[in-house]
Image (cartoon, rainbow, N blue to C red):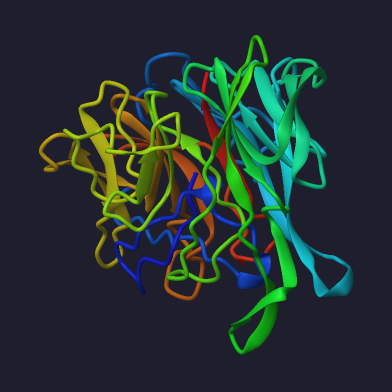
Amino acid sequence: MTPDQPVRAVPKTRRLVLAAVAVAVAAAIAVPLALRGGDEQDRPASVPDATGVAAHPDQSPPRELIAAGRVAVSAYFTRKLVEQPNGNAVGTYEWRLLNTATGRYGKTDWAWLHVAPGMRTAAVLERDLPVSRIGLLDLATGKVQRWIKVDRSVGGVEFSPDGKRLLATAYGLNPDGMFKDASYRLNDRTVPGPKPSRTGFHMIDVVSGATDFVERPAEGNEQDGPAGGRQDFHWSSDGKLVWEPGNNAEGKIYYDLTGRRSASPDQGVNPSYPGAVLSPDGTLMTGDFVGEGDRIVSEIRNAKTGERAAVVPGQQLLAWADNSHVIAWRCDPKRCSPGQGEFRNQLLLVGLDGKAIPLSGFRPERLRDKGRWEPVLTPR
């Protein structure tokens, strides 16, 4: 999941990894424009492999399960800035989590969560981050089955690709906090800013609860705004390394499980932009926006050669449903023009043949609308 950026004004802009972006509604972080689809229409596509398609194009935010092939929307969130005493504020995530018994999304009060592959369990963190324990919640009952305590408080947590381990990022302060004494200028206004407080990460065995802590403070980067805030670690696709967002060509800085810098695990892969996603068989990779004029399309590349393999509808390609279908954001083709409707987008299932199936309804056009939701896509 990554935020969009306006493509007419800034084509081929690098997308930030959503889980690592500090919540700062006051900063009005823009999400990508999805432009008019041109000759790509919402034609029925063949249903992909695995477990088929669950689509609700009349729902936004969704109330019932959205899924395609190997992945599903396991949860989604909205964000808002909550003012605090003394001029401080907290960027707050409001989560809706799938109940697998009912197939519906329900509101939760967790500050942070992540769903394990297979969609049976979620790791949850309580409000007032950082916290000293991690809950393991049953998606069918909505109840925490047990708690794992940590000796250094955490503000983010993520399951490994095999679901057997947790990667929990430790902080000294709320990673989503905005502090008056860290204020900065934004659009001719002085707004509270984030503070760097990351201390490292925990490696946790889910079954035993055994925890190893690795010290890895945040280094900070002023290039894209004030340093600090949420700077979570994430798993590599094979679960052998962890990474954090960086300004290198790949957009990721890798570490081994002891915290030492490491080379990228995909040495034979040619990413077209930071955040590109490999197909399940490893042969293809999502590409960047390549549309011109009224065509809103993105490219698929050969993972080894970097050559273009296909062009598909959509402005942002999020995840692979199978080896020939991708879940993407695209705006309303009837209302997509500069200044009008660029941000009114919906989830689509798109095939390499260019056909598309709407999966969700359209998000509100206004960027600061409280109804603008961000999906969490999880292997099922």
- Position of 132 with respect to 329 (left or right) is right
- Where is residue 149 shown, x and y percent of the image? 76, 25
Q: Nearer the viewer, residue 40 or 310?
A: 310
Task: Give above or below for 185 relative to 29.
Answer: below
- Relative to 218, 292 lies left or right: left
- In which image quadrant can residue 354 be found? top left
Q: Residue at x 28, y 32 (%)?
A: 265
For this orientation, the residue located farthest to the right is: 85
Quarter-wise, where is residue 135 in the image?
Answer: top right
Which picture quadrant has residue 206?
Answer: top right
Q: Is residue 327 left or right of residue 250?
A: right
Could you say which is closer to the camera, residue 282 or residue 135? 135
- 47 to 273, vertically: above or below: above
How far across and how far down the image is residue 7, in percent?
36, 66
Q: Where is 99 relative to 368, above or below?
A: above
Q: Is residue 168 visible?
A: yes
